[in-house]
């Protein structure tokens, strides 16, 4: 895969990296990534993937931009209030890099359309804000053989993990079922520091680029936890659950 003079200048800081180089940049250009949610997590993911030159980026979201979004959802501007987030985020990504392809998906992801949507992409970045969608995406990625990079953020903390269909543990080994109703406060009640969402979304984009290029060590099998108040990161090992309803040895 050849690069134009413009490409060589745009991606020069990638190409000089020993772990990326021209081969890695070619992989980035050939990659197809679906970003679920164009909010606090999805915004930096979309922008960094576009900046990196990911060839095809899908944006799945059915919500419109509101004023309260702008404190953390950096793909959108004040003038975008009332627009679909998919359209706003697409325009922001293309303004940054017009040489990538952006697909917008404005239908809510359901059990009826999830497989058809996810099967079009190589990697899925989950930045959704509810467990029903997270479980649906994780289950579908597992069955469709797609790598899932999942992030979550609330208040001053965040979590990040990568799940590969050919390996274990899977997302349901980590969280087998949704917490009891009312035990986890939504963002509207608990709040979230905007920059904390930015940290987690940026890390999510980084892990996606590592998965595409093969650079470094995968996060699969581990959970990264970030505490913004203490400025502390730590990583824990995720263990396969033999009773897991998705990938457990006793379910096959």
Image (tube, rainbow, N blue to C red):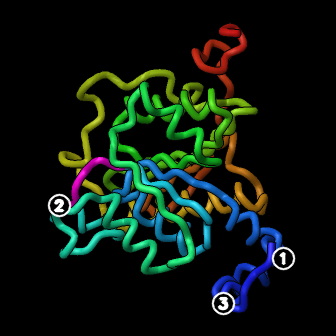
Residue at (71, 10) in percent of width and height = 252
Q: Which dot, 2 or 3, sits closer to the camera?
A: 3
Residue 74 position (above or below residue 126): below
Which type of secondary structure does the marked residue at label 1 adopt?
A: loop
Q: Nearer the viewer, residue 34 or 211?
A: 34
The crowding category of the residue bearing disc 1, from other C-alpha atoms within 10 Å (few below 14, some 14 to 19, many at least 20), is: few
Residue at (29, 69) in percent of width and height = 76
Query: Over which residues does the magenta segment extend?
Result: 61-66
Which type of secondary structure does the marked residue at label 2 adopt?
A: loop
Residue under circle 1? 18
Q: Using the numbered discs, state the Cα–Cα distance from disc 3 to disc 1 in whole angstroms.
A: 21 Å
Apparent side of residue 226 relative to residue 14 in the rendered image (left or right): left
Mark positioned earlier in the residue sequence (2 or 3): 3
Residue 41, by quadrant, is bottom left
Residue 29 drawn at (x, y percent): 68, 67
CB-based contact (under 8 Å), mark 2 and mark 1: no
Residue under circle 2? 66
């Amino acid at each position: 895969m050849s690069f134009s003079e413009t490409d060589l200048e745009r991606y020069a800081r990638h190409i000089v990296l020993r772990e990326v180089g021209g081969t890695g940049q070619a992989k980035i250009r050939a990659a197809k990534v679906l970003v679920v949610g164009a909010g606090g997590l999805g915004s930096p993911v979309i922008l960094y993937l576009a900046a990196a030159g990911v060839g095809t980026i899908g944006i799945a979201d059915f919500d419109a931009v509101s004023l309260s979004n702008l404190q953390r959802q950096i793909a959108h501007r004040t003038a975008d209030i009332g627009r679909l987030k998919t359209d706003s985020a697409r325009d922001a990504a293309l303004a940054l890099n017009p040489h990538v392809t952006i697909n917008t998906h404005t239908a809510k992801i359901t059990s009826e359309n999830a497989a058809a949507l996810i099967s079009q992409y190589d990697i899925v970045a989950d930045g959704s804000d509810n467990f029903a969608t997270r479980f649906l995406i994780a289950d579908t990625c597992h069955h469709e053989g797609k790598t899932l990079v999942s992030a979550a953020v609330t208040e001053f903390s965040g979590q990040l993990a990568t799940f590969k269909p050919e390996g274990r543990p899977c997302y349901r080994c980590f969280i087998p079922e949704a917490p009891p109703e009312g035990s986890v406060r939504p963002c509207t009640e608990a709040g979230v520091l905007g920059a904390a969402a930015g940290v987690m979304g940026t890390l999510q984009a980084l892990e996606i680029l590592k998965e595409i290029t093969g650079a470094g060590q995968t996060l699969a099998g581990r959970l990264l936890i970030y505490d913004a108040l203490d400025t502390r990161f730590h990583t824990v090992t995720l263990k396969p659950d033999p009773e897991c309803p998705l990938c457990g040895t006793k379910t096959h």
